[in-house]
Amino acid sequence: MEQKITSHIVKGLIIAAILIVINIIGQLTSYIFEDWFRWIGTVIYVASIIGSTIYFGKQNDNNINFGIAFTHSFRTATVITSIMFLYTLLSVYFIFPGQIDHFVSIGIDEAKKQGKTAAEIQEGIVMARKVLIISFLAGGLMINLITGALGSFLGAAVAKKNPNFQPTQK
């Protein structure tokens, strides 16, 4: 009986769900504002992409080459990135809107230390909210894609491959 290959979509959904749960835990415990906590999601993301690539190779009896392994794992990464972008969009506007307020309050404290006037601070708040939301969305999208590409490359490099791979080979 031929083993069924787990789809990159299924893997992406599972990994994204894990990353979302970790983010929610970070939000609820306020660890999300700590520098060390931000690395946890990145490490899990890269490790899970590498693991899913190795698993893909095993499901194919290691009858793959670098290109096939990279393509499968990068597809997984794009599914994760898409889901995480939607989650970030919902998170910033609906689920955890206080996250933006936290960063704005830090900016207000810094502006007060620099001796800014109340009018300057108020003007800066409006601009800071817009910049933070755009940074969260665009930055999250680009960081997830870059991290996913790195994980895909490492996964394709680490996964066992058939040196005599033939594309028409069954």
Image (cartoon, grey):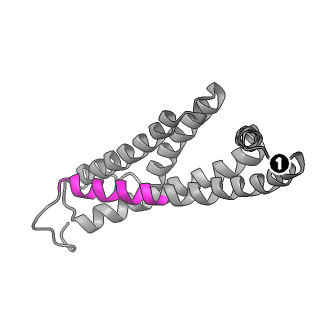
Q: Is residue 28 left or right of residue 20?
A: right
The answer to whether residue 158 is magenta is: yes
Residue under circle 1?
A: 121
Q: Residue at x 48, y 55 (%)?
A: 9
In the current view of this chain or complex, which residue is farthest to the right?
A: 119
The three-letter code of the residue at mark 1 reads Ile
**Residue range corresponding to the magenta coloring:** 145-160
Please determine whether, in this image, residue 96 is positioned above or below residue 74. Answer: above
Residue 86: give x, y in percent of width and height.
65, 53
Determine the residue positioned at 35% across, 65% down. 71
State the residue in front, 91 or 2.
Answer: 91
| Mark 1 secondary-structure assignment | helix
Labels in figure, total: 1
The location of residue 50, given as percent across then percent down, is 32, 49
> Can residue 79 be seen in the rendering of this structure?
no
Residue reaching furthest top?
Answer: 29
Residue at x 61%, y 60% (from the top left corner): 138
Quadrant of the rendered image containing residue 168:
bottom left
112 or 12, nearer to the observer? 112
Q: Nearer the viewer, residue 43 or 99?
A: 99
Q: Residue 139's spot in the image, x, y percent?
A: 58, 57
Q: Is residue 156 magenta?
A: yes
- In the rendered image, residue 107, in percent from the top left (x then y), is placed at 72, 43
